[in-house]
Image: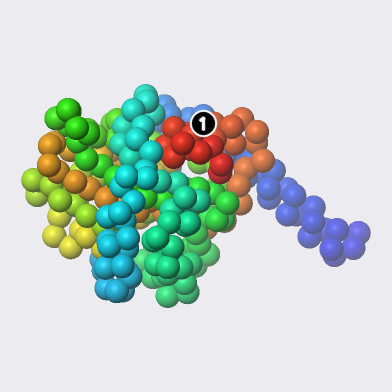
């Protein structure tokens, strides 16, 4: 057998094994079965250069009105998917998220040398989330309570939450993680312009409800050490439904 054929068979075998593992993982993680090796999280403070952070802050203040408000069983809150975000006035600032400088920061923080953003076709690569109490209501959360994300990536999936604004009455972030079953409160000092990285399909997480006059704006990012999307049609369809609920656009 030629070397090339052998390499192709090896790659196919790797893909197949990963598909089976992902299918199993998505099935059991809803029952709380997760990997103990995937409970670590990282916080990178001052992750964006000041001028990028300031530029984004300015740009997103005008985007609130264009975001989609969702009050389904999936989620309550407002969001703008990656495709819309990338054609908004925030666009000039979004290039930084693909830069070597940014990616090196992620790799240095996690020690994962192949960590990279998921492909741009995935609306979850870089999206914008607003949290505030809608008019006439006293509080809002993201409506999901403690949960684990699903994954459509054959590699490890890393979620990133970059806080732009956390204008709340609390001393800790509304975002809470529960690695190893222990609730972790993230202090609010240094929270703006920090990136919290965690494996959301292995670590339980939630956003506490916001009360009137509180406001929170975050950029949600998605990374993987092997950012290949599953070919499993059921998983892909599930992801489309989630995307439609979040962003009003099923494109993934
Ligand atoms: Fe989540």
Quarter of the figure that contains the N terminus: bottom right
Quarter of the image where one finds residue 230: top right
Is 45 placed left or right of 107 in the picture?
A: left
The secondary element bearing badge 1 is classed as: helix
**Quick check: 232 above or below 169?**
above
**Quick check: 141 above or below 159?**
above
Q: Which residue occupies the foreground of this view, 92 or 159?
A: 92
Farthest top residue in view: 73
**Quick check: 220 above or below 71?**
below
Quickly name the residue at label 1.
241
Q: Which residue occupies the foreground of this view, 90 or 115?
A: 90
Q: Is residue 200 visible?
A: yes
Q: Is residue 150 visible?
A: no
Count of labels shown? 1
Quarter of the figure that contains the C terminus: top right
What's the residue at 40%, 60% (across, down)?
89
Farthest right residue in view: 1
Give residue 79's position: percent from left, percent from top.
Answer: 37, 43
Give residue 88's position: percent from left, percent from top.
Answer: 43, 56
How many other residues sit within 10 Å of disc 1, few (<14), some (14-19) or many (≥20)? some
What's the residue at 51%, 31% (across, down)?
241
Give residue 105's position: percent from left, percent from top.
Answer: 39, 70
What's the residue at 56%, 55% (across, down)?
119
Give residue 197's position: percent from left, percent from top.
Answer: 35, 55
Q: Which residue occupies the foreground of this view, 246 or 147?
A: 246
């Amino acid at each position: 057998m030629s070397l090339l054929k052998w390499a192709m068979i090896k790659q196919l075998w790797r893909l197949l094994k990963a598909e089976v593992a992902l299918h199993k993982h998505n099935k059991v993680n809803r029952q709380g079965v997760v990997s103990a090796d995937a409970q670590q999280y990282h916080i990178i403070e001052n992750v964006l250069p000041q001028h990028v952070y300031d530029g984004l802050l300015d740009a997103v203040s005008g985007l609130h009105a264009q975001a989609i408000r969702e009050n389904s069983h999936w989620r309550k809150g407002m969001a703008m998917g990656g495709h819309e975000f990338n054609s908004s006035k925030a666009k000039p600032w979004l290039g930084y998220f693909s830069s070597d400088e940014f990616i090196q920061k992620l790799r240095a923080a996690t020690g994962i040398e192949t960590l990279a953003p998921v492909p741009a076709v995935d609306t979850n690569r870089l999206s914008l989330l607003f949290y505030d109490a809608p008019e006439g209501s006293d509080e809002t959360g993201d409506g999901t309570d403690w949960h684990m994300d699903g994954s459509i990536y054959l590699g490890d999936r890393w979620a990133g939450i970059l806080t732009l604004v956390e204008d709340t009455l609390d001393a800790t972030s509304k975002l809470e993680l529960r690695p190893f079953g222990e609730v972790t409160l993230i202090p609010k000092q240094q929270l703006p312009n920090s990136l919290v990285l965690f494996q959301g399909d292995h670590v339980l997480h939630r956003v506490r409800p916001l009360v009137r006059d509180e406001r929170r704006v975050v950029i949600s990012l998605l990374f993987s050490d092997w950012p290949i999307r599953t070919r499993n049609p059921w998983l892909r369809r599930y992801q489309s439904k989630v995307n439609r609920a979040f962003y009003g656009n099923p494109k993934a």
